[in-house]
Amino acid sequence: MVDYSITSDFFIYLLDLFGTISFAVTGAFKAIENKSDVVGVLLLATITGVAGGTIRDIVLGRFPNSLTDPAYVILTVVSGIIIFLLYSRVKQHWNLFLKFDAIGLGVFTIIGASFAYGIFGLNFLVILLSGVLTAVGGGILRDVVVNQIPIVFIKEFYVSASFVGILSFYFILYFGGDIYQATFPSVLLVILLRLIGMKYNWNLPRARERSD
């Protein structure tokens, strides 16, 4: 008989590693674009890959997985090395960076929500906080380190995509779905919304400056 709790935990763990790789790639790209050497590339890849999950674990009262499981740092370093070596071939494909950022956003949003659900159940505010912190924490640190305004504050439909995905995750569970049924559609929804937002330049309303 399959132990579904163990299967579910392993499934979430694999997704967490996948999200770590996706964001690590964006960190490596940003470091190279800002003329960092190989050490800087690996450092920013690691910061971007693990920061969101680390912040999430601290807020939820857990010892960070990134400090106890070497797989996280190993994967960020390997991702950084691969991008460093292949950058000359992919540097013209800026969309690759944006696509990895969208994938990382989707995966980390729902992974954060899943961790909160596993600890606190269907507490929407905790699920929302955990999902958003996991999704944007690494990206904010990545952009701050390279002295740029974080993408989350200026880009169209970024946190909003996370919010919609978290709503999807919550309501699927609320109406009787299991963790698998809630996770996959919600991850894909966030990624799709982010990509569509980029394609069509979706923007939320902004404050207008007064013109005299």
Image: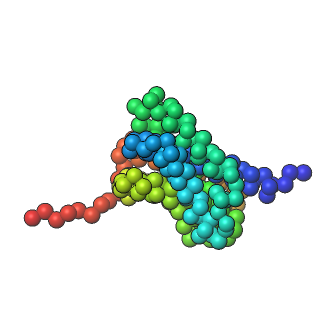
User: Looking at the image, which is closer to me, 171 or 148?
Assistant: 148
Against 62, residue 100 (above or below) is above
User: Looking at the image, which is closer to me, 123 or 72?
Assistant: 72
Q: Percent from the top left, x then y, of residue 48?
A: 52, 52
Coloration mode:
rainbow
Can you name the residue that lies furthest to the top here? Answer: 89
Q: Percent from the top left, x then y, of residue 181?
A: 68, 52
The residue depicted at 70 percent of the width and 64 percent of the height is 118
Against 141, residue 120 (above or below) is below
Q: Would you say residue 39 is visible in this rendering?
A: yes
User: Looking at the image, which is closer to me, 57 or 212?
Assistant: 57
Would residue 37 appear left or right of 182 to someone viewing this image? left
Can you name the residue that lies furthest to the right here? Answer: 1
Q: Percent from the top left, x then y, of residue 192?
A: 50, 45
Would residue 137 appear left or right of 184 to someone viewing this image? left
| Quadrant where the image shows the C terminus | bottom left
Tally of numbered tags: 0
The residue depicted at 23 percent of the width and 62 percent of the height is 208
The residue depicted at 43 percent of the width and 37 percent of the height is 95
Would residue 203 appear left or right of 26 to someone viewing this image? left
Q: Percent from the top left, x then y, of residue 207?
A: 27, 64
Would residue 50 appear left or right of 204 to someone viewing this image? right
The residue depicted at 44 percent of the width and 30 percent of the height is 88
Q: Would you say residue 105 is visible in this rendering?
A: no
Which quadrant holds residue 75?
A: top right
